[in-house]
Structures are given as structure tokens and as C-alpha cells.
Image (cartoon, grey):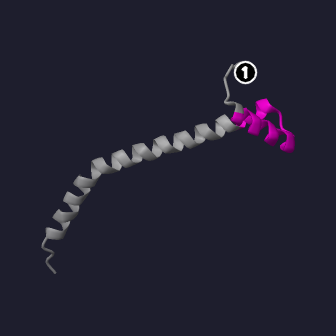
Amino acid sequence: MKNVSLKIDDSIFGETEKILSRIKKPRNRYINEAIEYYNRLQRRLLLEKRLKTESELVKNDSMKVLKEFEEVDYVD
């Protein structure tokens, strides 16, 4: 495990301490879980951004191919 020193806003610290006293969880465990949750959220947001970008890149080509298929004269 790594040691980290951080500064927390007084209001956030106070609220955290109130919550910790009610849920009976060590501060260290609570902060680790919060960071883990936030990391998962950020990974999802990064993936969403990447997928949107890639989707835009292929959108024009897909529309072009679709138009070409629509123009094909199907003979029975």
C-alpha cells in the first residue's frame, strides 16, 4: 500500500466524519472505496467519449454504404 497525504476541504472532512461515525467504517477504507468508485466512473466516461468519437468517424462511411445499397437495382 502507498501512503498519500492530502488536503481535504473542511466541509467535506466534516461531512465525511459524520457519515463514518454512523456507518462504523474506518476512514482509510471509506476513502479507498470512494476513489475506487470514482476511478470506475472516470473509466466509463473515457470509454463513452472514445466510443462517441469512433462512432462519428464511421458514421459517414456507414451512411455512404447504406445509400449505395439503396441505389442497387434488385432484379427478380
Rendered-image quadrant of the C terminus: bottom left
Question: Which amino acid lies under the numbered mark 1 shown in the image of this protein?
Answer: Met
Q: Which residues are magenta?
A: 11-33
Image point 47% across, 40% down: which residue?
46
- Examine the rendered structure and indicate whether residue 57 appears above or below residue 69: above
Using the rendered view, name the quadrant where residue 28 is placed.
top right
Using the rendered view, name the quadrant where residue 65 is placed.
bottom left
**The stretch drawn in magenta includes residue 20:** yes
- Examine the rendered structure and indicate whether residue 72 appears above or below residue 75: above
> Is residue 20 left or right of 61 when viewed as pictured?
right
> Is residue 9 left or right of 16 when viewed as pictured?
left
**The stretch drawn in magenta includes residue 31:** yes
Report the residue that reaches farthest toward the bottom. Answer: 76
Instruction: Kindly tell me whether residue 40 is visible in this rendering.
Output: yes
Query: Residue 9's spot in the image, x, y percent?
Result: 67, 30
What residue is disc 1 on? Answer: 1
Q: What is the tally of numbered marks visible in this picture?
A: 1
Report the residue that reaches farthest toward the front. Answer: 11
Task: In this rendered view, identify the residue nearer to me: 71 or 10.
Answer: 10
Query: Residue 33's spot in the image, x, y percent?
Result: 71, 37
Image point 59% across, 37% down: which residue?
39
- Examine the rendered structure and indicate whether residue 22 appears above or below residue 4: below
Task: In this rendered view, identify the residue nearer to me: 3 or 5.
Answer: 5
